[in-house]
Image: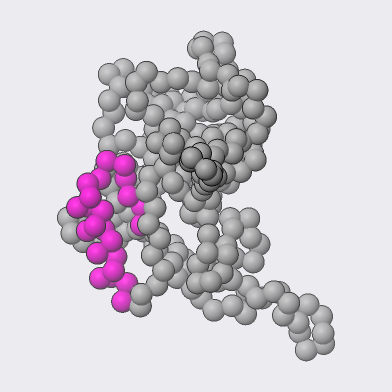
């Protein structure tokens, strides 16, 4: 992601977060919220990120390398996240409310649900949760797909489409009453599983400090879809009459279990 003519990656070691503030659109205005533990698909949120980029190559007076992130100026960026089930009017109101609040005209990045860049996900230290506003499952069970490329870049998104097809390269988290379970596919990587554990622990703390996190293998109880001879994340091209263009995904990573969703295609 390029902000203020600087390319930033979630893996950069010279980028330092100095502050995070959260807002939620209520009516036509943004209201401060203390913490943002969970995103709901019928809401709009704003994340104000204060950060500093360390200047590389700074040396002390004696010529030895110096390392002090104060050498870079403080910068500010706003991400505004739009839930899948928000209306066009609500999305416009969120953008307008942010513009009215940000008098200094910093960078504003529009993020639609399902297109969260790794840089944004990294600000939540692997505890990014997206839930549907209403539980449409009559059993009361909520099922989340865990996707990402590493423990710090995983997020969990609730699945609501029926029927749900489970996949061997995935990890899932289920919530039912006071039970939190991790379902592990046979081909799920260690990084994804560790990310699922972190999110499941976070969900447990949000609901009850005494909830146990239980892990089970999917193949013991459910039928799963197998990937077709894929050993890494696929690259997808859109073909025209005389040429083809690669379809870009903000999630693309060789270690990612899912890079494209059906809505992207």
**Residue 228 x/y as whole percent:** 60, 21
Q: What residue span does the magenta drawing correspond to?
A: 80-103
Q: Which of the pair 132/91 is nearer the observer?
A: 91
Q: Is residue 101 above or below residue 260?
A: below
Q: Which of the pair 205/80 is nearer the observer?
A: 80
The colour style of the image is one colour
* Residue 141 appears in the figure: yes
Q: Which of the pair 130/107 is nearer the observer?
A: 107
Is the C terminus in the top left, top right, bottom left or bottom right quadrant? top left
Query: Is 125 on the left-hand or right-hand side of 29?
Result: right
Q: Residue at x 65, y 76 (%)?
A: 55
Q: Residue at x 72, y 80 (%)?
A: 58
* Residue 200 appears in the figure: no
**Residue 152 x/y as whole percent:** 58, 46
Query: Is 176 on the left-hand or right-hand side of 156?
Result: left
Kindly indicate the quadrant of the structure image that contains residue 215.
top right
């Amino acid at each position: 992601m390029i902000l203020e003519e600087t390319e930033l990656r979630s893996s950069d070691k010279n980028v330092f977060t100095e502050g995070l503030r959260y807002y939620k659109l209520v009516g036509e205005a943004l209201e401060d919220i203390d913490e943002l533990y969970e995103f709901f698909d019928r809401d709009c949120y704003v994340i104000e990120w204060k950060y500093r980029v360390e200047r590389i190559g700074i040396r002390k007076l004696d010529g030895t390398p110096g390392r002090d992130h104060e050498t870079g100026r403080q910068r500010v960026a706003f991400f505004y996240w739009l839930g899948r089930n928000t209306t066009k009017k609500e999305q416009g109101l969120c953008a307008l409310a942010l513009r009215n609040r940000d008098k200094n005209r910093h960078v504003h990045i529009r993020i639609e649900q399902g297109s969260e860049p790794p840089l944004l996900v990294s600000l939540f230290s692997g505890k990014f949760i997206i839930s549907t506003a209403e539980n449409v499952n009559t059993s009361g069970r909520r099922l989340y797909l865990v996707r990402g490329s590493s423990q710090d870049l995983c997020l969990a998104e609730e699945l609501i489409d029926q029927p749900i097809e489970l996949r061997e390269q995935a990890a899932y988290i289920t919530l039912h009453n006071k039970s939190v379970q991790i379902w592990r596919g046979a081909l799920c990587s260690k990084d994804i599983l560790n990310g699922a554990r972190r999110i499941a622990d976070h969900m447990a703390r949000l609901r009850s400090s005494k909830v146990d996190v239980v892990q089970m293998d999917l193949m013991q109880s459910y039928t799963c879809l197998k990937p077709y001879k894929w050993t890494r994340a696929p690259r997808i091209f859109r073909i025209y009459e005389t040429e083809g263009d690669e379809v870009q995904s903000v999630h693309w990573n060789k270690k990612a279990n899912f890079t494209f969703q059906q809505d992207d295609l």
